[in-house]
C-alpha cells in the first residue's frame, strides 16, 4: 500500500517541481489600474468642471482655459433658487417619489407572479411589458398630449406621476423578476409547508431576501424619473415644471448663463447622488446575493 | 402521528411519456421510519414531494391518517420537511426560523417561546438562537432545519437528503442522531437518500426505487438477504453483492465448472419464464464464508497464482477481494492491502474452499440481465 502511494505521488510531485506554478504577471493589474484611473478621470472631469463652475462668477465661468483658482461664491445658487428652483425641485421630488412608490407596488407582485408562479403565457406577457419600451417616446407624445389635453391634465404633476409610473414599470418588472428568480425555490416550499399563505410568504420570506434588488430597482426608477425631460417639457409649463425643464431655462436666446446653469445642474444632480449613496449598502448586498444559501 | 398510504400514486410530467413515479403503492405504518432509496432520477424525491404537496398527484392517491391528500395544499397536510439545502430563512435568526411554523399556526407567544427553547435544547442550539443562519456551520444549519421540523410536532416528517451537504464524518454522527430523535419522537418519517448505507442503517423499512417503479419495500435485513431482483441485489450492500450471469443447468446453474443447486421454487421460476440459457445469480460474500449449509453450496477452489489474470473483482466483506479469472474456473482471494490472502501450493491444487450458499442465490428470471 505504502509503495503504491509513493509511486502514485511521485510523478505528480516531479511534475510540480519541473513546471513551476505560473506566476501571475504583476504588470497586468498595474496597467489595468492606470487605465481605470484615466477612464475614471476622463468621465469625472465634466462633473468636476460643472461643480467648480457653479461656484464661479459668471465672468470667470467664460475664461478659456478655465481658471482653476478663483474666489468661490454662492451667488449663483442664490440666484437659481430665487429664479424658481424651489418649485421645480418639489415637482421633481413629488413626481419621482410617488411614481417610484407606485412602480414598486405594482412591479413587485407582478414580478413575483411571472417569476415564481409562471403559467403558459408568461413569456408573452414579459415580452409585452418590454415591447412598450420599444416605441420611442417622441412617437407617442402627440397622442399622449391629445389625451392629456382632452382630460384637462396638462401642466398637472399627477400627469407626470402616471406617465413616469408607466414608463418605469416594464423595467422594474424585468429587474425584480431577475432578483426573484435568484430566490431558492426550496425557501418558498419550506414556507408553504410551514403554513404560510402567499401574502405571508411574500412579506416574511421573499421580500427580505430580495430587498437589495428592491433597492436597486427603486434607484433606477428614481434616476429615470428624476432625469426625465422630454415628457416633462411637452406636458408641463409654469405649474408642474420639473428640474430638467427648469435647467433648460438658463439656455436663452441671448446666450448661456454658464455659472447659473452649472449651479442649477449641481443642485439637480445632488438628490440622485444622495439616493445612490443611501442605496449603496443594499446594492453591495445585491452583488453578494448568491451567497444566501 | 399517522400512517401514510401511497395508493397507486403516479406523477406524470408529460402525458404519454414514462411517469416520474409510476403507480407507487406503499403502506407506511404509524411511527415508522421509512427510507426511499435509489439512483438519481429514480423518482424517490418526486414521491416525497408528492406527499409534501409540492408535486401533483396525477393518478391514484396518497393518504395521511386515512385522509386523501389529492388537492390538499401543503400547509393543510400537517407535515414538516427538512430540505437538502435546509432552506433556512436567511433574514431570520435561528430562533425565528424555528418559530415561523408555530407563528403561522397562530400559537401564543409564550407557548412558541417554550417550544423553540425546548427544540433548541434538544438539538444543542441554545446559544445560537439569536444568530442568523449564515453565521452557522453546515452541521449547525442542518440542526436548525431539523429544529424547524420537530418544533411543530407534525404528523409526518419528510426529509429530502438532509445529510448530503455534510462532510463524511459529520454525516455518520448526524445519521445516528436523526435515527435516535425519530425513535424518541415516534413520528412517522419518510427519508429520501441515494446513499444505501443511510438507507440500511436508518430505516425500519426501505423502499428501493428505479425509474419511477418500486422494486422492493422491505426491512434492511430482508433486502440484504432476499433481494427481489438483480437491481436490488446490486444496489444494496456495501461493498456490493457479487453478481454473476451464468448458464442454466439441469439441477441449477453452472458456475465455475460446477453446478449450483437451486431450490425447486427457483427452478420453476426459471422454467416458468421460459429461459433456458442464462440467469443472474447473486451471492452474499459474507454468507459465502459463514454459512452452515455447506452441502447446499458450491465449493469454489481458491487458488493462489501470482500470474493469474484477474478479469473480475468482487468484494468480499471481511476477506477483501475475490477475483475470478477470465475463464471463470479459478478464484483467488486478495486482501484489502493487495496481498493474496489464500496461498495454495502452486500447481492448481485447491487448498481452501469457499461456499456460496444457495439460500442467498437469487434466480433473476430476466434473461441475461446484469446490473450496473
Image (cartoon, coloured by chain):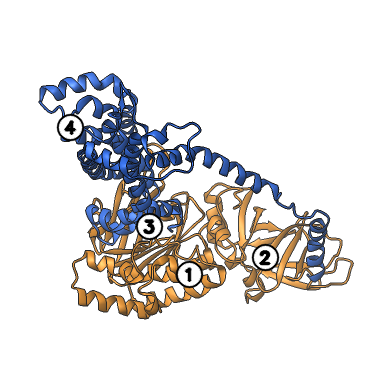
Chain colours: A blue, B orange
- Of tags 2 and 3, the one toward the viewer is 3
Find disc 3 in the rendering and name its residue: B48
Q: Give x and y (percent) for residue B87.
A: 39, 60
Q: From mark 4 to mark 2, how far is it between C-alphas? A: 80 Å
Q: Which of the 4 quarters of the picture holds residue A224?
A: top left
Residue B137 is labelled as 1
Query: Which type of secondary structure does the marked residue at label 1 adopt?
Result: loop
Cβ–Cβ under 8 Å for marks 2 and 3: no
Compared with B18, B343 (above or below) is below
Query: Looking at the picture, do discs 4 and 3 lie on one chain?
Result: no
Query: Which type of secondary structure does the marked residue at label 4 adopt?
Result: helix
Q: From mark 4 to mark 1, how far is it between C-alphas? A: 54 Å
Query: Which type of secondary structure does the marked residue at label 3 adopt?
Result: helix
Which circle's residue, 2 or 3, is located before the other in the chain? 3
Q: Label 1 is found on which chain of the structure?
A: B
Number of labels in the image equals 4
Q: From mark 1 to mark 3, how far is it between C-alphas? A: 27 Å
Q: Is residue B51 visible?
A: no
- Of tags 4 and 3, the one toward the viewer is 4
Q: Is residue B141 left or right of residue A109?
A: right
Find disc 4 in the rendering and name its residue: A159
Which circle's residue, 2 or 1, is located before the other in the chain? 1
Query: Looking at the picture, do discs 2 and 3 lie on one chain?
Result: yes
Neighbor class of circle 4 (other Cα within 10 Å; few <14, some 14-19, many 20+) is many
Query: Looking at the picture, do discs 4 and 1 lie on one chain?
Result: no
Q: Give x and y (percent) for residue A209.
A: 35, 55
- Of tags 4 and 1, the one toward the viewer is 4
Find disc 2 in the rendering and name its residue: B315
Compared with B117, B254 (above or below) is above
Q: Residue at x 36, y 59 (%)?
A: B26
Amino acid at each position: 500500500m505504502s509503495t503504491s502511494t509513493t509511486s502514485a505521488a511521485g510523478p505528480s510531485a516531479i511534475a510540480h517541481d519541473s513546471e513551476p506554478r505560473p506566476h501571475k504577471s504583476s504588470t497586468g493589474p498595474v496597467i489595468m489600474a492606470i487605465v481605470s484611473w484615466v477612464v475614471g478621470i476622463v468621465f469625472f472631469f465634466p462633473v468636476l468642471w460643472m461643480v467648480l463652475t457653479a461656484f464661479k462668477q459668471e465672468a470667470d465661468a467664460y475664461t478659456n482655459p478655465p481658471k482653476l483658482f478663483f474666489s468661490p461664491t454662492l451667488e449663483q445658487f442664490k440666484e437659481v433658487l430665487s429664479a424658481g428652483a424651489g418649485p421645480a425641485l418639489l415637482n421633481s421630488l413629488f413626481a419621482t417619489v410617488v411614481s417610484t412608490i407606485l412602480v414598486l407596488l405594482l412591479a413587485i407582485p407582478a414580478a413575483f407572479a411571472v417569476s415564481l408562479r409562471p403559467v403558459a403565457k408568461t413569456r408573452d406577457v414579459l415580452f409585452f411589458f418590454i415591447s412598450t419600451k420599444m416605441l420611442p417616446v417622441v412617437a407617442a407624445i402627440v397622442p399622449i398630449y391629445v389625451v392629456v389635453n382632452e382630460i384637462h391634465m396638462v401642466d398637472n404633476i399627477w400627469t407626470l406621476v402616471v406617465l413616469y409610473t408607466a414608463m418605469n414599470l416594464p423595467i422594474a418588472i424585468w429587474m425584480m423578476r431577475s432578483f426573484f428568480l435568484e430566490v431558492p425555490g426550496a425557501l418558498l416550499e419550506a414556507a408553504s409547508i410551514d403554513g404560510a399563505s402567499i401574502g405571508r410568504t411574500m412579506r416574511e420570506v421573499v421580500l427580505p431576501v430580495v430587498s437589495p434588488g428592491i433597492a436597486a430597482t427603486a434607484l433606477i426608477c428614481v434616476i429615470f424619473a428624476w432625469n426625465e425631460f422630454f415628457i416633462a417639457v411637452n406636458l408641463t409649463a409654469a405649474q408642474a415644471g420639473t428640474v430638467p425643464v427648469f435647467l433648460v431655462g438658463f439656455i436663452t436666446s441671448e446666450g448661456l448663463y454658464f455659472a447659473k446653469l452649472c449651479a442649477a445642474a449641481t443642485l439637480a444632480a445632488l438628490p440622485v447622488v444622495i439616493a445612490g449613496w443611501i442605496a449603496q449598502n443594499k446594492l453591495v448586498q445585491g452583488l453578494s446575493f448568491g451567497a444566501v444559501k | 402521528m399517522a400512517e401514510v398510504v401511497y395508493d397507486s400514486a403516479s406523477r406524470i410530467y408529460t402525458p404519454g411519456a414514462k411517469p416520474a413515479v409510476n403507480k407507487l403503492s406503499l403502506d407506511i405504518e404509524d411511527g415508522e421510519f421509512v427510507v426511499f432509496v435509489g439512483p438519481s432520477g429514480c423518482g424517490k424525491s418526486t414521491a416525497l414531494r408528492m406527499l409534501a404537496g409540492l408535486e401533483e398527484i396525477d393518478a391514484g392517491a396518497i393518504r395521511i391518517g386515512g385522509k386523501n391528500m389529492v388537492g390538499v395544499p401543503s400547509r393543510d397536510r400537517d407535515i414538516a420537511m427538512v430540505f437538502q439545502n435546509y432552506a433556512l430563512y436567511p433574514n431570520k435568526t435561528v430562533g425565528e426560523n424555528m418559530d415561523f411554523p408555530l407563528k403561522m399556526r397562530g400559537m401564543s407567544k409564550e407557548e412558541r417561546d417554550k417550544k423553540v427553547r425546548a427544540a433548541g435544547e434538544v438539538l444543542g442550539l441554545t446559544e445560537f438562537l439569536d444568530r442568523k443562519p449564515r453565521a452557522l456551520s453546515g452541521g449547525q444549519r442542518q440542526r436548525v432545519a431539523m429544529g424547524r421540523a420537530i418544533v411543530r410536532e407534525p404528523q409526518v416528517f419528510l426529509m429530502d437528503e438532509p445529510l448530503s451537504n455534510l462532510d463524511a464524518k459529520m454525516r455518520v454522527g448526524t445519521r445516528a442522531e436523526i435515527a435516535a430523535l425519530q425513535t424518541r419522537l415516534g413520528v412517522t418519517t419518510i427519508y429520501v437518500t441515494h446513499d444505501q448505507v443511510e438507507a440500511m442503517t436508518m430505516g425500519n423499512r426501505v423502499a428501493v426505487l428505479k425509474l419511477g417503479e418500486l422494486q422492493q419495500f422491505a426491512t434492511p435485513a430482508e433486502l440484504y438477504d432476499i433481494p427481489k431482483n438483480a437491481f436490488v441485489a446490486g444496489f444494496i450492500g456495501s461493498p456490493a453483492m457479487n453478481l454473476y450471469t451464468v448458464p442454466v443447468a439441469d439441477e441449477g446453474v453452472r458456475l465455475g465448472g460446477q453446478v449450483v443447486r437451486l431450490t425447486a421454487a427457483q427452478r420453476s421460476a426459471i422454467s416458468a419464464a421460459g429461459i433456458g440459457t442464462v440467469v443472474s445469480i447473486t451471492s452474499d460474500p459474507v454468507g459465502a464464508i459463514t454459512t452452515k449449509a455447506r452441502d447446499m453450496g458450491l465449493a469454489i477452489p481458491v487458488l493462489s497464482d501470482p500470474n493469474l489474470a484477474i478479469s473480475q473483482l468482487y468484494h468480499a466483506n471481511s476477506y477483501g477481494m475475490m477475483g475470478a479469472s477470465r475463464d471463470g474456473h479459478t478464484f483467488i482471494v486478495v486482501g484489502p492491502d493487495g496481498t493474496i490472502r489464500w496461498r495454495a501450493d502452486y500447481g492448481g491444487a485447491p487448498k481452501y474452499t469457499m461456499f456460496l450458499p444457495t439460500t442467498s442465490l437469487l434466480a433473476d428470471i430476466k434473461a441475461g440481465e446484469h446490473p450496473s
